[in-house]
Amino acid sequence: MSALRWNEESEDVELVSACQSGDSESRERAFECLVRRHQKPMLNLAYRVVGDYDEACEVVQDAFLAAYKNMGTFRGEARFSTWLTTITLNHARNGLVRIKARRSHEAYSLDAALKTDEGDLRQDPPSQSPSALDQMEEAGVRQKIKSCIDALPRDFREVLVLRDLQEHSYQEIGVMLQVREGTVKSRLFRAREGIKDCLKRARGAS
């Protein structure tokens, strides 16, 4: 474990302790620090899972609220970030259900639905200055990769994001998803193969 990661985990332990044992004001200050430290990776995770920026923001808000309410149940058997990631994943799954239900009731054309999906691009807005060709190509590659990740089954997508994008260990991912490490590795292999096949098809169609 790197010194930086050890320091971050030690600070998390101190902040969690303050959330569990301090007075009301101290608890709120400590939790605000935890939110600032973990908000960005949790939002990235939620966005990758649900594929919708607004829904991801709601997911993260709900996840942090649930974490605050249940802070007393955290026993430190895993890292705080592992515990928080598990909560965020559960809320992201609920977010996927909401998105599917909402879309099934929307009386819009396919063209109108695409306009909704374009809102996701706010995470990577185009530059207002003239774009160079290589910048355009790089943005195109990122969009293709995102589309391929979004097309994966949820179980594969979760493992890919947790391992390749957020660099959690196989053991941590197993704890988060409540599956064996062998299952994590199998899903990751199939997810990577799915991405490779998807990108090959995308290049062939371009």
Image (cartoon, helix red, strand yellow):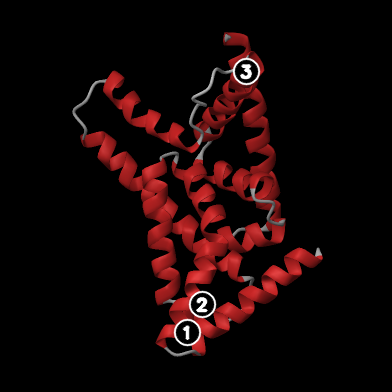
Judge whether residue 178 can be spotted in this image.
no
Neighbor class of circle 2 (other Cα within 10 Å; few <14, some 14-19, many 20+) is: some
Q: Position of residue 59 (x, y in %)?
A: 40, 54
Residue depicted at 25% across the width and 35% down the height: 104
- Tell me how far mark 2 sits from mark 1, CA to CA: 6 Å
Circle number at residue 30: 2
Residue depicted at 43% across the width and 57% down the height: 60
What SS does tag 1 mark? helix
Residues at discs 2 and 1 in contact (Cβ within 8 Å): yes
User: Tag 1: residue type?
Assistant: Ser
Count of residue discs: 3
Q: Sequence-wise, which precedes: disc 3 or disc 1?
A: 1
Q: Is residue 37 above or below residue 197?
A: below
Residue topped by disc 1:
26
Single out the mark in the foreground, 3 or 1: 1
Q: Position of residue 203 (x, y in %)?
A: 63, 14
Q: Residue furthest front?
A: 129
Quadrant where the N terminus sits is bottom right
User: Tag 3: residue type?
Assistant: Glu
User: Tag 2: residue type?
Assistant: Ala
Q: Sequence-wise, which precedes: disc 2 or disc 3?
A: 2
Residue topped by disc 3:
137
Q: Does 93 sit left or right of 98 as displayed?
A: right
Q: Does 99 sit left or right of 139 as displayed?
A: left
Circle number at residue 41: none
What SS does tag 3 mark? helix
Judge whether residue 199 can be spotted in this image.
yes
Q: Is residue 141 above or below residue 52?
A: above
Residue depicted at 71% across the width and 57% down the height: 169
Q: Position of residue 109 (x, y in %)?
A: 24, 21
What SS does tag 2 mark? helix
